Amino acid sequence: MPATTSTAPTPQAQPVPLPSVHVRVLLTWLAVFTALTVVQLAIGPYVAGFPMLLRTLVITGIVVPAVVYAMVPNLLKVRTAALRRLR
């Protein structure tokens, strides 16, 4: 006979509601501002002599993927964890 497991109900985590558009704007702005500042400080001296459009292309080519693929998803995870902790 197989071992039985406890059938006591376990409390399930309540789903955290999706953030409002205003919260998403705030988190995206925070990520973009931070990423632009860091990238400007890190590579600004190297691209200072580039024409403005090329400089903008290089900087946004670094910032946009970092924000979309890493920063905003991680900020949303932090938000979710904080809201769960408060509940």
Image (cartoon, rainbow, N blue to C red):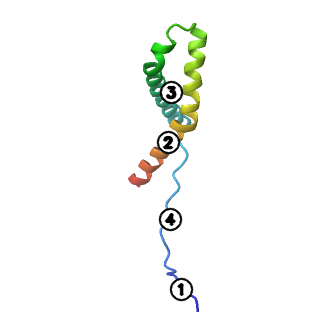
Mark 3 residue type? Val
Height in image: 72 above or below 13?
above
Residue at 60% across, 10% down: 53
* The N terminus sits in image quarter: bottom right
- Measured from the top left, where is residue 43 in percent x and y? 47, 19
Element on which disc 3 rests: helix
- Which mark is first along the chain, 3 or 1? 1
The image's mark for residue 12 is 4
Label whose residue precedes the other's in the sequence (4 or 2): 4
Q: Are marks 4 and 1 in contact (CB under 8 Å)?
A: no
Residue at mark 1: 4
Task: State which tag comes first along the sequence, 4 or 1.
Answer: 1
Image quarter for residue 66? top right
According to the picture, the residue beneath numbered tag 2 turns out to be 74
Give the foreground label among 4 and 1: 1
Residue appearing at x 49%, y 34% in the figure: 27
* Image mark for residue 32: 3
Say which of 43 and 17 sits in front: 43
**Residue furthest to the bottom:** 1
Q: What is the three-letter code of the residue carrying label 4?
A: Gln
